[in-house]
Image (cartoon, grey):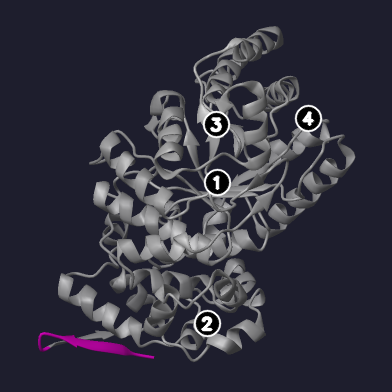
């Protein structure tokens, strides 16, 4: 099926939906690298005009990657709710955009139709939205998740404490983690990216984090972000795995490059759910999966099938939602300037990712970050942090001094998130907020200067070491 539009007397023809979606995307260095981006502003505008007239049914009926060639495509088709699709199938993408932004559209309305759209539909409507539109539409949606505590309620902003260490030194990890707790951070998860993938190192980190949580009484989750098979092996040895982590992407081939498949993800989820049932922990809910994504991951693995990176990112969210995760976040600027060149592209991608994930029903967070060779700086991160907080992002990263000394990239710090909570009048997860108040770290929702009760927390960690 061909698509076309005319801009200033110049006619543009797009031979298929995959091409149309790519040309309608905002400027991204990754799409340019792949040779699929619009070659001029006029072509981009023409693609947007043509895309606005495409129906939801047309997009659902024409997956950008054929399901017989890709298990993710088949999964996305199998997960469609026919009743929800019936309600929206005749809408054009332009009409869908207007409906999402209309004051009369409620959160319940969006929740009712979300399983009737595919990720490609979410990507298409994102391409027709300005940054303000992405913020407004996302701010209307709250997706709540539960494990040891409750995340995502309106008025709540959570934090993943990320106490990475270049040699996986447990003393350094725990001291960085307690620093985060004293800033009121860590309610999303205390999650460590291990420098070494060995079973012994990962198990040591998991057990150390579990001891920290038990000793302090903080109602939060642990996670060691090794490969899923390493975490599963640790769980079989009795190590306490609260959240099972894995990076995922929007194509079967890209996931294969990560060493995962749909069957492996399902197996891991079932294993950790069973281990949760056997552990003596007061679980608030049963969600146990944690996924990270990022625009450009499929292209970097040469597994993009000629599809633009925004659409592939949406497909990763479509995969994630079938596994009912506790946490999902886009590591938006981590892959590098080859895929998101500068501050403008990183900010745009962060707003797109958050909106699409929320629209599809995910508890979305964001690692607001950039690499040291990108055309960005800490002010860039501050800008995106404020915009995503306004959009209702579930959680951000808390990295000591914003500088991850193991992964060698720049993110957001503990005090950054404290500033966002104060600026927007937000609070931690309810169970975690109660613990912070009881510990003297918060008083009436505000961070306090160090007190004797906080000194006792430090002494608890000293005993652990």
For discs 1 and 3, the disc positioned in front in the rendered view: 1
Instruction: Based on the picture, tell me whether residue 44 belongs to the magenta stretch.
Output: no
- Tag 2: Cα neighbours inside 10 Å, few (<14), some, or many (≥20)? many
Where disc 4 sits, the SS reads: loop
Position of 462 with respect to 100 (left or right) is right
Sequence order check: which comes first, mark 2 or mark 4? 2
Instruction: Based on the picture, tell me whether residue 4 belongs to the magenta stretch.
Output: yes
Q: Which span is picked out in magenta?
A: 1-9
Sequence order check: which comes first, mark 1 or mark 3? 1
Please state the total of marks drawn on the protein image: 4
For discs 2 and 1, the disc positioned in front in the rendered view: 1
Position of 303 with respect to 218 (left or right) is left
Considering depth in this image, is 334 or 177 the residue closer to the camera? 177
- Tag 3: Cα neighbours inside 10 Å, few (<14), some, or many (≥20)? many
Does residue 94 lie above or below 236 as drawn?
below
In this view of the protein, can residue 435 be seen by the observer?
Answer: yes
């Amino acid at each position: 099926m061909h698509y076309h539009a005319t801009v200033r007397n110049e006619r543009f023809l797009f031979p298929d939906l995959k091409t149309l979606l790519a040309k309608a995307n905002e400027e991204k260095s990754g799409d340019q690298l792949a040779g699929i981006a619009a070659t001029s502003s006029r072509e981009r505008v023409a693609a947007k005009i043509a895309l606005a007239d495409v129906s939801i049914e047309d997009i659902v009926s024409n997956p950008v990657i054929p399901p017989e060639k890709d298990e993710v495509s088949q999964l996305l088709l199998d997960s469609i709710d026919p009743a929800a699709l019936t309600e929206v199938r005749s809408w054009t993408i332009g009409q869908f955009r207007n409906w999402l932004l209309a004051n009369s559209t409620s959160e319940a309305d969006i929740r009712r139709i979300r399983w009737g759209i595919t990720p490609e539909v979410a990507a298409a409507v994102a391409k027709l939205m300005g940054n303000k539109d992405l913020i407004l539409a996302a701010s209307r949606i709250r997706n709540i998740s539960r494990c040891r505590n409750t995340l995502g309620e309106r008025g709540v902003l959570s934090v993943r404490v990320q106490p990475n260490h270049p040699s996986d030194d447990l003393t350094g990890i725990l001291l960085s983690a307690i620093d985060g707790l004293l800033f009121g951070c860590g309610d999303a998860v205390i999650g460590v990216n291990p420098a070494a993938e060995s079973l012994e190192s990962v198990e040591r980190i998991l057990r150390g984090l579990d001891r920290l949580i038990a000793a302090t009484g903080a109602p939060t989750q642990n996670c060691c972000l090794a490969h899923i098979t390493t975490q599963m092996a640790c769980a079989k040895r009795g190590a306490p795995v609260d959240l099972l982590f894995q990076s995922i992407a929007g194509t079967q081939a890209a996931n294969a490059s990560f060493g995962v498949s749909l069957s492996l993800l399902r197996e891991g989820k079932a294993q950790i759910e069973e281990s949760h049932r056997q552990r003596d922990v007061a679980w608030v809910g049963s969600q146990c999966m944690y996924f990270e994504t990022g625009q450009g991951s499929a292209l970097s693995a040469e597994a993009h099938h000629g599809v633009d990176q925004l659409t592939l990112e949406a497909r990763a969210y479509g995969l994630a939602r079938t596994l009912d995760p506790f946490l999902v976040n886009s590591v938006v600027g981590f892959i590098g300037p080859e895929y998101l060149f500068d501050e403008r592209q990183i900010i745009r991608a962060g707003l797109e990712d958050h909106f699409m994930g929320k629209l599809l029903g995910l508890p979305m967070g964001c690692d607001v970050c950039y690499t040291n060779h990108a055309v960005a700086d800490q002010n860039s991160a501050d800008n995106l942090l404020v915009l995503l907080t306004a959009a209702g992002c579930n959680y951000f990263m808390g990295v000591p001094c914003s500088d991850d000394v193991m992964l060698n990239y720049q993110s957001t710090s503990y005090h950054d998130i404290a500033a966002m909570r104060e600026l927007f009048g937000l609070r931690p997860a309810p169970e975690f907020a109660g613990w912070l108040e009881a510990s003297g770290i918060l008083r009436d929702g505000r961070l306090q200067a160090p007190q004797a009760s906080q000194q006792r927390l430090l002494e608890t960690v000293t005993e652990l070491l």
